[in-house]
Amino acid sequence: MRCVPPQKSSTFDFSAKTRPCPDLPPPQGPLGELQPGAGGSVFMLWKGDPLVASPALTATNPFASAYDLAQQANLTVGPLAPVAAHHPRLAGVRVLANVSTQHFGPDGVSDGDHHWRVRSDLLASGRFYSEITEPATLEGQTVSTVATAEWSEGLWMESNVEMEYANAYPTSLPWFQSVFQDGWASGLRPVYDWTTNPFDIPYFDSIQYATEVGIGNKLYVRRLHPTQSGSYCGQEFTLDASTAHLHPIAAKVYDSAGRLRKATEFRDYVEIASGVWRPMQVLTTNYMNDGGAQGGSKVISSLRVDRITLLEPNSTLETLRDDDLTWQVWQN
């Protein structure tokens, strides 16, 4: 049971934490009537499909930013067009993967490894059904907690074995996006990016690039950002030019001062369908302060994909809505 809408909190793994309220009784009252929650919130107890009890919904993609939505569907010109052709956007996946995140403070000390085991049906449109298993400590023992979530038609539905009620949150709620991005997105965002754009290629034909042939069959492709005095390299892609597939093996992001802000490695390529390739391991380091790679805080995250099945845009996903659950459907 969750007594109040989730609240964002700052932690080393940038995840939102929610806690049940053990000293409060579970919500009572008839099904289908609005009830007051803590902090001025309002919810409705509902048995059955929570979409029926939700306020007006707007279908959105929880993972896509305005920058993502502005991009072209395909690349047709430029040195990265062949890369996009051999590693295209996927319409959807059924995936089993491991995601981990580790934060290092300015002193270089880690706060520990945070792991998620992700089983998910996920579409490029943002719809998903996911089960995430996360290690937890209970009375000194390491246990696994399992949470299930679904995003469909503008409603986020979440069920946890520790909750007496499942919860449904309209994505139009003002606090929703920040909570989702710092919570469930920690485990799901790497899988979504791997599905739709694993190398963070900018899908704009108008972007300027410079290329350089390196030793060992490497090709460097650098994205140029124009300035008043010339240009600077904002992204650098290292491609394996030993085959026609041009697999990216590394990607780097720089700020305007030339400081490294993000470095990613791509490993273990597999042809997951005819002519369609993906790296089954991705290792990313984000540098969190102005020192870039020269020092300061950093976050290292990894994705390992163990099993993959391709889905179509109209594939039927698993759903929580068919389960015999009692819902707290949040209204504000």
Image: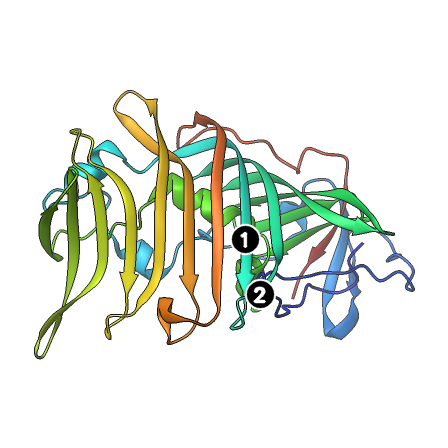
Q: Does any portion of residue 178 appear in the rendered image?
A: yes
**Amino acid at circle 2:** Val
Q: How many marks?
A: 2
Instruction: Name which residue lies at 84% across and 62% down.
Output: 21
Q: In this view, does 63 lie above or below 81?
A: below
Does dot 2 land on a helix, a strand or a loop? Answer: loop
Quadrant of the frame with the N terminus? bottom right
Q: Is residue 126 visible?
A: no
Residue 104 image point, x, y percent: 53, 64
Q: Could you tell me how far apart the alpha carbons at marks 2 and 1 are, in whole angstroms? A: 14 Å
Instruction: Mark 1: give few (<14), some (14-19) or many (20+) Cα within 10 Å.
Output: many
Tell me which label, 2 or 1, sits earlier in the chain: 1
**Residue labelled with disc 1:** 101
Q: Residue 109 carries which label?
A: 2
Q: Is residue 229 left or right of residue 276?
A: left
Which residue is depicted at the point 52% across and 59% down? 181
Q: In which quarter of the image is residue 36?
A: bottom right
Measured as percent of width and height from the top left, residue 319 is found at 61, 35
Q: In this view, does 172 lie to the left or right of 221?
A: right
The answer to which of 10 and 149 lies nearer the viewer is: 10
Where residue 61 appears, x then y in whole percent? 44, 51
| Residue 17 versus residue 309 in the image, above or below | below
For mark 2, does the 10 Å Cα neighbourhood hold few (<14), some (14 to 19), or many (20 or more) residues?
Answer: few
Q: Residue at 31% of width from left, 50% of height from top?
A: 200
Task: Tell me if 316 is positioned left or right of 321 in this view.
Answer: left
Query: Given this view, does label 2 or label 1 mark the residue nearer the observer?
Result: 2
